[in-house]
Structure formats: C-alpha cells, structure tokens
Amino acid sequence: MVLLSLDTDVVLMSDGDTRKLDHMKKKKLKHLSSRPVFFPELVEMYHKGTLKDSDIRKALAPFRADTEQPEAAN
C-alpha cells in the first residue's frame, strides 16, 4: 500500500506485515502496478498519527486472499 509520495517518481510503501510503518519501503513508481483502491479512513488515521500496522493488514486482507495460491498436495 502506498502511503506517501516523496516526489513524482518515488513513493513510500507499507504492508503492515513485512514492511511496517516505522520501516517503510522506498519504491519507484515505474516498478509498481496499481489497483484503483482508495482507503480514506487510513489516510485520515495516517495524518492524525493514529494509523497502526494492524489497520493496514486488515485493509489489505481481501487483496492478499486474491493472490494466495493453494499449496501443492504431497
């Protein structure tokens, strides 16, 4: 999830799991593919300073379920 745009080419990202809010990933926009989803409640919480990693994980949970693949049977 992109949380902050540093300039026109670089953003800061966090997923609340491997990339927490206190150690966000700097990423160039040209390396990302986007989904047109906006979380205004998370933006408001971020600006107030109350956003937590668990809030991000909850918001991204439906998208993670879409990308998970079933494990191969032994």
Image: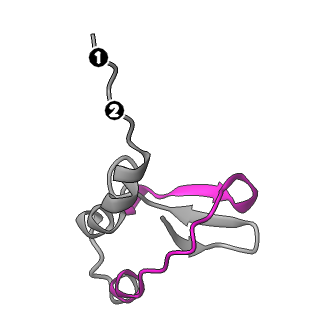
Q: Nearer the viewer, residue 53 or 69?
A: 69
| Residue 27, placed above or below residue 73 | below
| Residue 57, placed above or below residue 4 | above
The quarter holding residue 20 reads bottom left
Residue 65, image x and y in percent? Answer: 34, 51
The quarter holding residue 7 reads bottom right
The mark found on residue 35 in the picture is none
Residue 41, image x and y in percent? Answer: 34, 86
Residue at position x 41%, y 87% from top? 40
Specify the amino acid type for callout 2.
Pro
| Residue 73, placed above or below residue 44 | above
Residue at position x 75%, y 67% from top? 9
The quarter holding residue 46 reads bottom left
Return the residue at label 1: 73
As helix, strand or loop, the secondary structure at mark 2 comes to: loop
Return the residue at label 2: 70
Which corner quadrant holds the C terminus?
A: top left
Residue at position x 32%, y 51% from top? 17
Residue at position x 38%, y 42% from top? 68
Q: Nearer the viewer, residue 27 or 1?
A: 1
Q: Nearer the viewer, residue 9 or 70?
A: 70
Q: Residues within 10 Å of mark 1 (few under 14, many from 20)?
A: few
Specify the amino acid type for callout 1.
Ala
Q: Residues within 10 Å of mark 2 (few under 14, many from 20)?
A: few
Residues rendered magenta in the picture: 21-45
Q: Residue furthest top?
A: 74
